[in-house]
Amino acid sequence: QVQLVQSGAEVKKPGASVKLSCKTSGYTFTSYYLHWVRQAPGQGLEWMGTINPNDGNTKYEQKFQGRVTMSRDTSTTTIYMELSSLRSDDTAVYYCVRLSTGRSGWYYFDPWGQGTRVTVSS
Amino acid sequence: DIQMTQSPSSLSASVGDTVTITCRASQDVKHWLAWYQQEPGKVPKLLISGASTLHSGVPSRFSGSGSGTDFTLTINSLQPEDFATYYCQQADSLPVTFGQGTRVDMK
């Protein structure tokens, strides 16, 4: 079955960088866009950006431009998200998620990785 | 960017009630609207795509309607496992945007 398995929790100091991974399996890696979504404690879902695993092209939410880098490794069917210059308000659970489409042709986010908790604290 | 506004932000209901959540887009997203359910501490789960297409395995008490800018998620005969937070999401254009969420809790 399709699975997205994310790396473990991270604790970082302000100003540091964090690089998260999302290992995919159960489908053709290059056939589906993958996205990153984060959720701060008690808050809603916030889209960060997307990567095309086929060619590595990315598109980022404007507020993260200059701080985020998404990449992929086709040999391990894994994507990565690096966020730099961390601040306390970057404390959140970070999810990778596949952009899927069903027989109806509609796009949706499914499945989701299990999430990676990132804590930014001095 | 397309802004998604849900209402209400929270509601209290009882088992067996019918619950309606509204999502409004700041511009036309046609039918490119999905709904997700998130229980506390859990990963969001897809309920509906294309504004009204129920995802596989989702109980039929969930239904979605609407197009353009106004959408509705209805839960008929609310069950104990339905107490959660619900998000709408537009998939019409980047950046992807979510509503702020509607928390459904027990009255």
Image (cartoon, grey):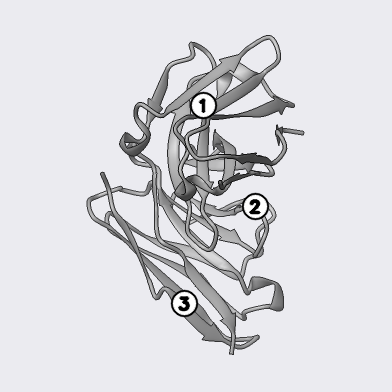
| Residue at mark 1 to residue at mark 3: CA–CA distance | 32 Å
Amino acid carrying label 3: it is: Ser
What residue is shown at x 47% (from left), y 58% (from top)? Answer: A44
Residue B8 as seen in the image, left or right of residue B81 = left
- Tell me the kind of residue under disc 1: Tyr
Q: CA distance from mark 2 to mark 1?
A: 19 Å
Secondary structure, mark 3, is: strand
Residue drawn where x is 63% and y is 86% of the image: B16
Compared with B93, B69 (above or below) is below
Q: Is residue A62 above or below residue A40?
A: above
State whether discs 2 and 1 lie on one chain: no
Residue A40, given in percent of the width and then of the height, sits at: 51, 54
Find out whether the residues at labels 2 and 3 contact each other: C-beta distance under 8 Å. Answer: no
The residue indicated by pointer 1 is A33
Q: Position of residue A81 (x, y in %)?
A: 54, 28
* Residue that label 3 marks: B10
Label 1, residues with CA under 10 Å away: few <14, some 14-19, many ≥20: some
Badge 3: how crowded within 10 Å, few (<14), some, or many (20+)?
some
The tag on residue B43 is 2
User: Between A11 and B1, which is closer to the camera in this rendering?
Assistant: A11
Label 1 residue SS: loop
Front-lying residue, A85 or B16: A85
The subunit carrying tag 2 is B
Q: Residues within 10 Å of mark 2 (few under 14, many from 20)?
A: some
